[in-house]
Amino acid sequence: MTEEGPAEEAGNGGDEGPRVGVVLVSHSREVADSTAEMAKALVGTGNPSPIATAGGVEDGGIGTSATLVRDAVKRVDGGRGVVVLCDMGSAVLTVKALLAETGEGALPENVRIADAPFVEGAVAALVTASTGADADTVISSTDDARGYRKL
């Protein structure tokens, strides 16, 4: 699940075909990985959409790495779109900068950033993507997560 780990079945939804991928970008590798594990556990089907993490920086420290984000997107992009969730600050800025790039090394056009809380958005995105929903529906589910009131 970590940045340097094996790729999830990139976009492969089993018999259903490619599904929307999810990338979690956090300043902490542990936060990204544990959030991804929780989201996968809550899918409940045993066959979640592809999910990858880009947590921390290459040496394992706290921060955000454009290289790790690019690699994570590549691992989960099966052609139906990739939804990226960020924890805060420079994670958001890094993904926005990558989305603005053009030419070689740029993220695919089908990558979208979700404006949602990290944990709730990750769960909503992965659960929705795992149903075979399109990227618009996955983004909509993260919008719902953003508006969910706890009191």
Image (cartoon, helix red, strand yellow):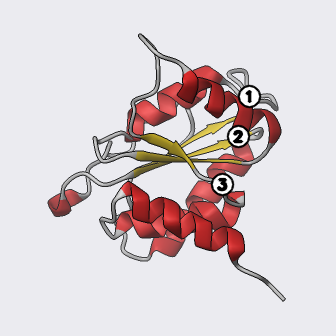
Left or right of 149? Residue 122 is left
Residue drawn at (43%, 69%) of the image: 128
Left or right of 62? Residue 143 is left
Marks 1 and 2, Cα distance to the nearest angstrom? 7 Å
Give the residue type at disc 1: Gly
Left or right of 143? Residue 62 is right
SS class of the residue under badge 2? Answer: helix
The residue under label 1 is 60
Residue 45: image tag? none
Q: Specify which label sits upstream in the sequence, 1 or 3.
A: 1
Residue 115: image tag? 3
Foreground residue, 28 or 104? 104
SS class of the residue under badge 1? Answer: loop
The residue under label 2 is 29
Foreground residue, 100 or 111? 100
Above or below for 31 versus 126? above
Marks 1 and 3, Cα distance to the nearest angstrom? 26 Å
Report crowding for label 1: few under 14, some 14 to 19, many 20 or more residues within 10 A (C-alpha).
few
- Image quadrant occupied by the C terminus: bottom right
Marks 2 and 3, Cα distance to the nearest angstrom? 20 Å
Give the residue type at disc 3: Asp
Q: Residue 130's spot in the image, x, y percent?
A: 37, 65
